[in-house]
Amino acid sequence: MKRKIVIAMLISMTLATQAPAIAYAAEGEGTPSNQTTGVDANNTSNLNNSTEGSSSENTGSESPASSAENGSVIVTDGSNVTTGDVKITDGTTAVTVSNKSNVTTGNIDASGVFVDKEPSVTTYSGATGADVNNATLTVNGNVIGGQQGISATNDANVTIKGNVTANGTDSTSYSYNKETQEWDIPINSVSGTGIYSDGTADVVVNGNVNAKTNGIVINPETTTTSETKGSIIVNGTVVSDNGCAIDVNSKKVDEGGTAFDSIDAFKAATPNITVYAINSAVVVSASVTGASDEEITNSVVNAINYIINNEEGYDVSGDDISHIGEYNTVNINKAFNVAATLPNGYTLSGGQYVNVTDNGNGNYTLTLTDSRGGITIKAVVKAVPAPAAQSNDENRAPAQVVIESLEVPSYADPNAAPAGSIVIDNTDAAVTENGTITSLPTRSVSLNLGQITPSQYKNSIIENISAAPISGALVIETDRVATLDRSMIETLATRSDIEVNIVFTYNGKKFKIVIPAGYDVESLLDENGYCGFLRLMSILGADEVI
């Protein structure tokens, strides 16, 4: 018996120009159908030329991809649905999937509507990028939501091949001022959760998770019929701007509790968590009866599987290494071994928070010592130590801090750089046929430091950091060694969603330094508020560009 699909056009009441939502709701019995968003066609139709919202019978053949821009997608009938990019601007949920449906999309954007309160405050009235309940969703791109990037509940299976971003929704609190007899706005508050889970879902994010407040929220209080313990894998950095990286709420409401009864109950409610790195002032938030904050945090942090980034393909081994999906992982304070033959002048780095012990003969022991993670195994140029102070020489003048500056060019107009001295380029993300993102959307700026002033250099860096694509990359290339000052670093700290590549020439060789998205960039500054490229190289390492 064939199954009839009803396609309902749900018109937004808030925006007259908002495109309709496409809803799949089943009537009758039979096997789930395979659908293309906005079209219910039989296998003889020309689907590429179909009109959105048309309806006819379906024989169960797989439908090709189509675009669903400017209209939400709702699939609740167990269908297999493939669509293109989904973008909404009315503050509602972009993609809703339930009842064992299987949906594949392109980029999802539910950023929401900008609320114009103050020019300096970016406030959105936005909802959720994708809400997945007892169903499967694959996103061949990025997900942007307002209140939530992803909501995954009741054994949901979600794979995001790009980044997840929750840029926030307006949660401004209002109070009544008795003196002025008016409603005051004490603070413009913006909240946004990257990943929301009831603890039963399996979520994989190939990129970063960027959130206004909490990176990952696990809420076992929500109603669920599943006893499955899920997992969350983030092959990138979990970034929380104003909240915590991992927030595990109290036990189920219907049990009448406001806190977990014990650490064991807390652990049982927390799914398996695997991440590359964490950038958040608070790592874990939860409430457990009789347990200190330190006990709660350690119970989660000690169980996190930190991904070992080993792009160079060195031999990695150790009894404490766990294989999670396609990743080698290790827990904090657990040692592992690396065998690597390195060229002269190089040593092995494991990342900012990894201790490396050279055992000789190309054998190294590495140990992650900080909950921020970020394990990246790579060969780096050995840092040249500064000469030791000779305090016993009474005739020697005291040491002075020397800050290098760019030579000021001699041309007349200091506000206009010569043509070709600052070159800016933008490239889109590269995506393979199966939806794998091979490169991020990138903004590149190339600077000839011999032809521009220090202020032009500084302003260009700050402006291009701000203009870099959301969840993308910024490439800064110079013809010589230069410096980042506090203003540049503070601007970069506001763009935790971007990866920064710094390319420069030193001693006749070209080097590239990568500052990962979500990195604690303010920790790079020295005591004088500067970070030169060579200092940056000694901290993060560099690759020679051939």
Image (cartoon, grey):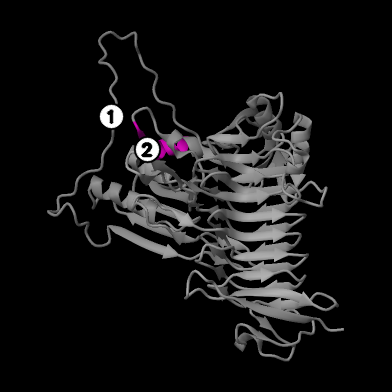
Foreground of the two, 192 or 42: 192
Q: x, y percentage for residue 458?
A: 29, 46
**Residue 335 image-quadrant placement:** top right
Span highlighted in magenta in the image: 529-538
Coordinates of residue 228 in the picture (x, y in percent): 81, 48
Tell me how far mark 2 sits from mark 1, CA to CA. 12 Å
Within 10 angstroms of label 2, few (less than 14), some, or many (20 or more) residues?
some
Q: Is residue 324 above or below residue 100?
A: above
Q: Magenta segment, principal secondary structure?
A: helix
SS type, badge 1: loop
Left or right: 168, with 29 as reference point:
left
Residue under pointer 2:
532
Q: Is residue 96 visible?
A: yes
Taking 132 as reference, is 384 left or right?
left
Q: Position of residue 100 (x, y in %)?
A: 78, 65
The residue identified by callout 1 is 402
Question: Where the N terminus falls, by quadrant?
Answer: bottom right
Q: In the displayed image of the protein, which residue is found farthest to the left?
A: 412
**Above or below 47: residue 427:** above
- The amino acid marked with disc number 2 is Gly
Of pointers 2 and 1, the one earlier in the residue sequence: 1
Q: Amino acid type of disc 1?
A: Val
The residue that appears at 34% across and 8% down in the rendered structure is 392
Q: Check if mark 2's residue and mark 1's residue have beta carbons within 8 Å.
A: no
- Quarter of the image for residue 489 reads top left
Residue nearest the viewer, comparing 24 with 516: 24
